[in-house]
Amino acid sequence: MLLGTWNLENLYRPGGPYGPRDKAAYEAKLAALASVITALDPLLLGVQEVGDPDALADLTGLLGGDWYTALSTHPDGRGIRVGFLGRTELRVVADTAGFPAPLRPVQSDDSGATEAAAGRGFLAVATDTGAGELTVAVAHLKSKLLSYPGNRFLPHDEGERARYGAYALYRRAAEGAALRALADELLAGEGRTRDVAVLGDLNDEVPAATTQMVLGPPGSEIGTPGYDHPDQGDAVRLWDVAPLIPADRRYSRIDSGRRELIDHVMVSHHLAHRVTEAGTGLPADPPPHLPSIGPDPAERRDTHGSDHAPVWIRVA
């Protein structure tokens, strides 16, 4: 089976403040997204930046065969949320946004405002793969693209840039801790026998502290000498599949000319040792050809496809 994640980049119907300005641009975007999903042919695909549930319905209408969908009921201020597209029936097992106790609210701007929940909720579903139950959570953590008061994307000065970078990091770290709390619930200390995955746009790379806290206890990472040696952490640990992605494909977005792997698939011990392949983009294609993103996401409002590449694994 193929399991993956993809940030669809501002999936809205046309006419609103964030989606394509006209029907032609919208239809071109849907066609581009549908062609990639059809080529991937995933059993289950976690998606991010679904701004309009009707737009997701439009997208699935372009895909062949029967598809099931699930969407979080916790969108952000622009209406974007996470969800799933799947070939088998999906049962929602969690849809949450709150920070775990005793984690306190984190500062989010110069006024001293605080946030006590993730900007976009986390959604977890269970599905029958034919070889047993698979449980998967999808997330979209706070972006590293900064915005400032007055809907600005450029700071007044470098002090403001640094402060708002810190606020974004506070929130992304708190969201990482909340996502790890959900992973603990799904694993329930049974990672050696349960097929569990956590995936999505974490807006940070593998070594980042915000990513590492989601993985759980260190040790036994893929590609290290400890990988094939069981230890006590196997029951609760998640393995990031990034080392299995060929080096020339190990990115899912390009930010100001820099290749980054900020979209992740992380799996339980029971799944990790059955992963046969991992990649970005489409398996049969060359490495992903992606646009380089600048500080203003509105510049891509009418563009086709997505600024992210899908990240996926095959499991035996």
Image: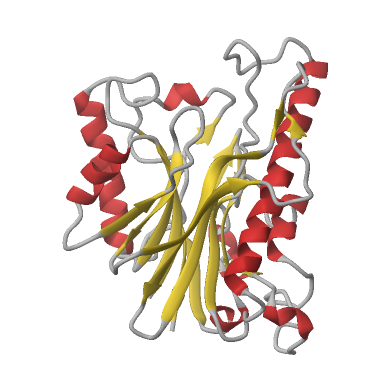
Q: How many callouts does the rendering have?
A: 0
For this rendering, which residue is in front, 96 or 209? 96
In this image, 65 relative to 223: left or right?
left
**Is 180 rendered above or below residue 256?**
below
Q: Is residue 86 visible?
A: yes
Q: Quadrant of residue 146?
A: top right
- Colouring scheme, one of rainbow, by chain, secondary structure, one colour: secondary structure
Q: Residue furthest front?
A: 101
Seen at 53% across and 35% down, the residue is 292
**Is 134 rendered above or below residue 296?**
below
Q: Is residue 225 visible?
A: no
In this image, 271 relative to 316: left or right?
right
Q: Position of residue 9 (x, y in %)?
A: 43, 38
Seen at 36% across and 78% down, the residue is 129
Q: Position of residue 180 (x, y in %)?
A: 67, 59
For this rendering, which residue is in front, 114 or 5? 114
**Is 91 rendered above or below residue 257?**
below
For this rendering, which residue is in front, 93 or 244? 93
**Quadrant of the snapshot with the N terminus:** bottom left
Q: Position of residue 71 (x, y in %)?
A: 39, 49
**Quadrant of the snapshot with the C terminus:** bottom left
In this image, 203 relative to 110: left or right?
left
Q: Residue furthest right?
A: 159
